[in-house]
Image (cartoon, coloured by chain):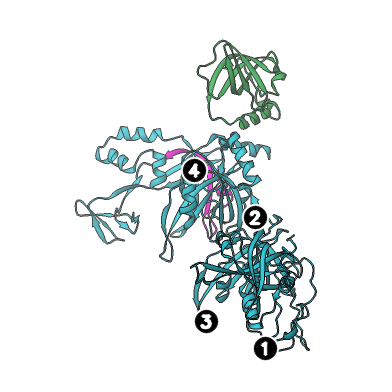
Chain colours: A cyan, B green
Amino acid sequence: MPVSLTPNAITAINAGDVNLKPLLQVLDIKMIGRSQERNQERYRFLISDGVSAQHAMVAVQLNDRVKSGAVDKGSIVQLIDYICSDVKGRKVIVVLNMETLVPQSETIGNPTIFGETDAEAQKTLSAAGNIPLSNRVGFNEPMVQHSVNKAPPRGINIQNSANSTSSFRPSVQPSYQPPASYRNHGPIMKNEAPARVIPIAALNPYQGRWAIKARITAKGDIRRYNNAKGDGKVFSFDLLDSDGGEIRVTCFNAVVDRFYDVTEVGKVYLISKGSLKPAQKNFNHLKNEWEIFLESASTVELCPDEDGSIPRQQFSFRPISDIENAENNTILDVIGVVTSVNPSVPILRKNGMETHRRILNLKDESGKAVEVTLWGEFCNRDGRELEEMVNSASHPVLAIKAGKVSDFSGKSVGTISSTQLFINPDFPEAHKLRNWFDRGGKDTASFSISRDTMPGGSSRNEIRKNVSQIKEEGLGRSDKPDWITVKATVSFIKTDSFCYTACPLMIGDKQCNKKVTRSGTNRWLCDRCNQESDECEYRYLLQVQIQDHTGLTWVTAFQETGEEIMGCPAQKLYALKYELEKEEEFAEIVRDRLFHQYMLKLKIKEESYGDEQRVKMTVVKVDKVNYTSESRFLLDLLVR
Amino acid sequence: MDTSSPSAFVNGALLRRYIGQKVRTVIQVIGSDTGSVVGKSTDDLQIVVRGSSPPNPLTTYLEVIGIAESDNSIRAETWTNFGNSFDPQNFNELCKLANGEFKHMFI
């Protein structure tokens, strides 16, 4: 609770009491010209006793108190030594000595200028205060002049259109409904008293007068745009209150100028008189169906005495194992230990803009690991820091707020503009993770949900079948191909035509690879490229028979998978068989490749060959059997 | 394949069923002394293996075939280093199945 100011001090001082040693609040500090005598600045305070405010000059010996910030706007001070003299018919207070009791405080009470004319009063009071009160701006040109029942009656200034006082809205935050303060006397009366503070969760467009007290958890940059109405700018910030309610606040155009500089992440503000509209779910990922839009009458006041009841951030961390099941584009929070950081890579975006991307790996106690993609600024700032930490073998804990799930290759998490990264944060979850990691979590194997890193089909995306099921279930017959994994043994490899002559020319960044025909003695013609080449590339086109305990079938393997199966490039085998004519050696190599068991990923599709419909199977990936995961798979089958 | 002297697949808990009989198991080596190796079974119980010639050096995992002397010790006849990456969970499940539902397929 703020310190109480000495009541009626201003009146007393003006009446001649110089022994009061009152407690007053400094509402404003201005530097007034330079003294002619000694070339020094003079400062002028606006001091208040909570009800009345008056200017006071500051003796030069106190100047450095002002310069050092020992006394500032909002400070509560005790005047030790002062005088009040008459100058040109006005009372001028001069402070000779004082002590600062409370360096910072919100304006106490509802002070009005003591004994000054209206226009000046409005100017001073609206300029005063460390708290930007937008409503005061509105009072600079009062349209209707009426006295207020709250302010102390000021003899000459009642009901006089030129000179009446307006009430200035106090900036305290009452938790009760203060007495209504009506600005206009007449048929239309507007209750101008400050609104009650309510929880963010209770906000809705039909609420009427409201005020919220919340901390800024995130603040966006000013974004400029251009639409049919012309140029505009916008910025948003997110709020969190003591009940855990969150809401986004958005400002457009002129409102941006008013509030952009005064809003700081981490500080607590009292906000009122904004309009509530439905939240734009595309950009706004907070759990609130409404969003606040600030306008010219809105108020945003800094609350310097925060009581810690409002948390700094609100997270709902999910274990990495949950991300596996999350839908594409879900926004979530996750925390884990960084196990590796890749270098930053420049990426060309669809709109031609270049940005950067960095991939890192995160793992947690759920036994799963996930790839995290950092985009843009995150690559440089946070990415570099994380890279250095991992390189010096200190694996940091990383907390991500508002990351987006992507299902591009397995499931991964990427940063978006509203993502926030926290490295080695001071949360209980972070400490728990640190303990787990240091005590052995580091060495436990983690299944990555981001890629099929576990050969052998332990990734949840793979459909596992045996050979007989392909026919039984009629795989490949629908309009989309079927992708399955089988564990099977290579039982026969056709050697009659195991490769073809391919076009080596590049189309963009890929090789053409279409079959070329001989033209002339030593040249090859490609129909697609319409060009000849001196050399062709020999690429695999293998027909392989595979077999498991249920049956056998034929599959086709192209270059990459062919090389896996044969263990050497097609070029080499071709040369061996046709150029060097070493049949024996050739046959031996082929024989050697039989009866190896693999995990084969197959693409199955029915295609028409003239009148016939044939099911074509292509080997897309060849992997060695991983005994650990395969054993688990089999155990699982046994249990069911 | 020599089936004259079959050994039962055991883990820590199953060892007591075969006291005096030939068993085989895989343990994670915790410590070794002259003539004995202390290890952790795949179900997290302690097993002591005594014998004349354990392999040197020892890898993390060790297979032991020998006579069960008590519910937590084995007199080894054959020791085999099983390397540093071994899945104890799978082996544990094997032991359970080999002594339970599928016992008829084993000894």
The amino acid pointed to by label 1 is: Ala
Q: Tell me, yes or no, whether dots 1 and 2 are on the same chain.
A: yes
Residue A279 is marked as none
Q: Position of residue A26 (x, y in %)?
A: 65, 66
The amino acid pointed to by label 4 is: Met
Can you identify the residue that label 4 sits on? A389
Q: Is the Cβ of the residue at disc 2 closer than 8 Å to that at disc 3?
A: no
In front: mark 1 or mark 2?
1
Task: Kindly report the distance in space between the C-alpha atoms of the residues bearing marks 2 and 3.
Answer: 38 Å
Give the magenta range. Answer: A465-493
- Pick whichever, A45 or A464, lies toward us: A45
Q: Earlier in the sequence, mark 4 or mark 3?
A: 3
What residue is rendered at 36% in x and 41% in y? A495
Name the quarter where the N terminus of chain A is drawn: bottom right
Q: Secondary structure at mark 1?
A: loop
What residue is rendered at 47% in x and 39% in y? A392
Can you identify the residue that label 1 sits on? A162
What residue is rendered at 64% in x and 55% in y? A312
Q: Secondary structure at mark 2?
A: loop
Task: Kindly report the distance in space between the C-alpha atoms of the residues bearing marks 1 and 4.
Answer: 68 Å
Neighbour class for label 2 at 10 Å: few (<14), some, many (≥20)? some
Can you identify the residue that label 2 sits on? A312
Residue at mark 4: chain: A
What residue is rendered at 63% in x and 84% in y? A141
The amino acid pointed to by label 2 is: Arg
The amino acid pointed to by label 3 is: Lys
Task: Kindly report the distance in space between the C-alpha atoms of the residues bearing marks 1 and 2.
Answer: 48 Å
Q: Position of residue A229 (x, y in %)?
A: 52, 81
Task: Kindly report the distance in space between the C-alpha atoms of the residues bearing marks 1 and 3.
Answer: 40 Å
Can you identify the residue that label 3 sits on? A229
Neighbour class for label 1 at 10 Å: few (<14), some, many (≥20)? some
